[in-house]
Amino acid sequence: MADPTLVNGQITDAVTQTNVKVLAEAPAMAMGSLYQVAAQSLSVAMQNAVTAQQNGNVLAQAATTMGVTVLYSMDTAADTVVFDGDSEATTTEKDDD
């Protein structure tokens, strides 16, 4: 026990035990905080990965849509316009043999 003081010994023992309890719990509290921070940062990283994947899928769908639009806008062989020297243009049609 500490040096004799005017304070009751039971009070100094209670304060000492409380201080020891706080110091004993500090490593567990620190590890708990560390685990929470690690879980939070991992969840944010996963959320960013999901968002990046969704954005990539939107971009791929837009590129596919533009490619199909270009394909549909092209003239086919049946729609070919032939100029035969006159001022009128004639459209050729496919012969079904």
Image: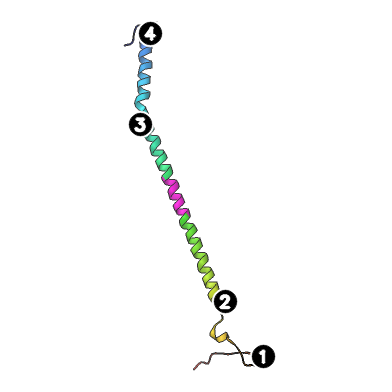
Q: Which badge, 2 or 3, comes first in the chain's sequence?
A: 3
Q: Which badge, 4 or 3, comes first in the chain's sequence?
A: 4
Task: Report the amino acid beneath label 3.
Answer: Ala
Q: Residue furthest front?
A: 85
Up/down of 74 relative to 9, above or below = below
Q: Which badge, 3 or 1, comes first in the chain's sequence?
A: 3
Residue 82: which quarter of the image?
Answer: bottom right
Residue 75 percent location from the top left of the image: 56, 81
Task: Report the amino acid beneath label 1.
Answer: Glu
Q: Which residue is mark 4?
A: 8
Q: Which residue is mark 3?
A: 28
Read off the magenta span. 42-51
Q: Nearer the viewer, residue 92 or 87?
A: 87
Q: For mark 1, does the 10 Å Cα neighbourhood hold few (<14), some (14 to 19), or many (20 or more) residues?
A: few
Tag 4, which secondary structure? loop
Q: Which residue is mark 2?
A: 73
Q: Which badge, 2 or 4, comes first in the chain's sequence?
A: 4
Residue 72 percent location from the top left of the image: 55, 76
Up/down of 40 relative to 48, above or below = above
Badge nearest the viewer, 2 or 4: 2
Cβ–Cβ below 8 Å for labels 2 and 1?
no
Q: Which residue is mark 1?
A: 88
Tag 1, which secondary structure? loop
Q: Residue at x 40, y 41 (%)?
A: 38
Q: Which badge, 2 or 1, comes first in the chain's sequence?
A: 2
Q: Residue at x 41, y 45 (%)?
A: 42
Q: Which badge, 4 or 1, comes first in the chain's sequence?
A: 4
Tag 2, which secondary structure? helix
